[in-house]
Each structure stands twice: as C-alpha cells, then as structure tokens.
Image (cartoon, rainbow, N blue to C red):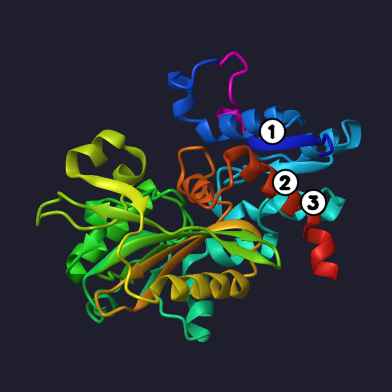
Amino acid sequence: MNKLRVLMLTHTNLIPPDDIKDRDDPRLNDCRSEYDVKTALLQLGHEVHVLGIEDDIAPIRQANETWYPHIAFNMMEAFADDGALDYYIVSYLDMVGLPYTGCNPRGMLLARDKSLSKKLLSYHRIRVPKFVVFPRGKKVNLKKAAQLPYPMIVKSTVEQGSVGIAQASYVSTPEELIERVEQLFSIAEGDAIAEQYIEGRELYVAVLGNTRLQVLPIRELVFDNIDDTMHRIATYNVKWNEKYRERWGIDYQFARNLPSGMSEKIIALAKRVYRILDLNGYARLDLRLTAEGNLYVIEANPNAAISTEDDVAFSAERAGILYDQLIQRIVNLGLRYRREIRD
C-alpha cells in the first residue's frame, strides 16, 4: 500500500486535539468521527494534515498548492454554517482536480434535499412517504395542512443528524402541524417538510462503492420499552443521547427475523436508490418496513457518520471489513472515482 498525503477537511470546531490519548476523553464527544478517521489514516501509514474550514475555500487552495495532497478526506457537513451548501466543497475539489472521499456534488445535492430526492424516487416507482414542503418565511396554509394524511412527521429539508426532530415532530392534526412548523423554523435551518408517518421497522442500510456496489449487513433501530405515549421515531435524543436510549430500551442492532426474501429485496432497493440519486463513495439509506412487507425509503445520507461507533463501521465489521480497512476502502474509492466515471 502506497503512503499518501491525506488532506482531512473538517469544521474548525471539530479538529481533534493532538494530545488526546484516552478514548474516554470528554473532548471526543464532539469530534469522535474526526479522531477515529485521523487515527486510522495514521495507523495505515499515511501522512495526515487536518484543515479546518468554515466559510472560505482559500485554505484548501493554499494547502493543495503547497502540500500537494494525493486526496482530500472530506468530513464537511456544511459550508458557511449552511448544511444545504456542503456540496460547495467537493465542487471546488472537482474544479481543481483534487480527488476526495465520499460523494460527488450532484449526488450530495440530490440526496440532501429531502423533497427533491423523494420526487426522484417516486418518479422511479419507489415507495416514499407522502409529503409537503412549507417554505421558510411563508405562513402555513390551514386548508393545505388539513388535506394531509395524518399522522405526519415534521423536519427540516436540509438538516442532518436528526437535528430538529423530537417527539413533538409527530403531529396528528393540522393545528399541531402548524405549531411544529413554526417551532422548527426557530431551531433548524432550511424549509420544513411534513412527511407521512410510516408505521414499521426502522432499518439502516450502508452501501460502499462507485460503480460496483457492496451493500453491508442491515442495521435496525429497535424500540423495546417505550410506552404508548411515545412515538417510534429517530429523534435527536435517540441518535445522540446514550442515557436516553438506555432509559427507554432503544437500541441499534443488526436486523433479525426479516421475512423470507426481504434481505435480497432490501439489497436490490439500496443499489437502485444509490444509483438513481447518483451517489458514490459511501452512504447510509434509512428505510421503513411495514407489517405488510412494503419498503419505504425515508432518506439517503451520503457521507454518513463513520466513527468506530456508528452503524456504517458496525456493518462493515460484520461483513469482515475492519475499521482501518473501511477507511482505506473509502480512500481507494475516492482515488478511483474519476477513472471509473470516464470508463
């Protein structure tokens, strides 16, 4: 394996401190993915330069022209504090010819916009929840809200990591929906999308590849002990608060007891969605499986979280890919992407 110069791009507030020695260091609470990726790259023998970016691409240009990296490991989730602009970074990398890990600009743009991605998938006859978008700054029309198939889930069209999603995001009446949309505008970026709540199992499917795809073992978010007053949705607390999950018996695990033939259907669906949305590198798809055996695509997440404690890493390990091998695979996919799309 060749030693590479890897330019690791991350947000300035997520640069892992160089003096961290203990994985239980509380400073890792905010930058665990960045720390794990940097550690793996160094253990693989690569030279790593971590560069913090916020709203200016000039540091990338300078690093590219003076350090001559072989590849950029892209861990940016926003640009200028706007999650809808994260594709700006890779657009620039494309223009200067610097290979990068993860998804291309078009795939990021299509997948990040929850309403646009649903329209595309629906056109291709893939089941998605019924939905409606409420633009920021415009008053919600009560008549329009009254025509929706309740219950609905209200969330941002562009935020990631379940930001803005809480138990209150589940709404059963037009009045509740209007109230939640107005609340969302005060706590999250972008427009609001209200999508039909799909009762069923919540499944997470990681995919690796550019043209040749590998679907990793399926994960599931399991709600064992929640009471009838709570809704089975992946809220911000569910995703980020371990004590909250322990309290309510909520756990991420590998999917068990899927109906006969369902795994094969999920694999085929994941590959189809990945290609329709023009994704590459790696991504995680969020699905719902109903009691009737119908699969709904909730959303696609290019450049999904890849710490050692995230679903992508767990699924890779189950498939026989150790964490450092996963990071190297992601690097290799980034290096090969331009050649593969030309062939």
Is the residue under label 2 in contact with that under label 3 (CB below 8 Å)? yes
Q: Where is residue 337 in the image (x, y as percent from the top left)?
A: 77, 59
**Secondary element at image label 3:** helix
Q: Which quadrant holds the C terminus? A: bottom right
137 relative to 119, above or below: above
Q: Mark 3 points at which residue?
A: 335
Q: Name the residue under label 1.
A: 41
Helix or strand or loop: what does disc 1 sit on? helix
Q: What is the x, y in percent for residue 29?
A: 44, 28
- Residue extent of the magenta highlight: 11-20
The residue indicated by pointer 2 is 331
Q: Which amino acid does label 1 sit on?
A: Leu
Identify the mark nearer the N-term, 3 or 1: 1
Residue type of the residue flagged with mark 3: Leu
Verify whether residue 198 appears in magenta.
no
Q: Foreground: 52 or 177?
A: 52
- Quadrant where the N terminus sits is top right
Q: In this view, does 116 lie above or below 30?
A: below
Proximity of marks 3 and 1: CB atoms separated by less than 8 Å: no
Q: What secondary structure is found at the residue carrying circle 2?
A: helix
State the image coordinates of residue 23 (x, y, percent, origin top left). 48, 22
Answer with mark 2 or mark 1, whichever residue precedes in sequence: 1
Label 3, label 2: how many angstroms apart (C-alpha)? 6 Å
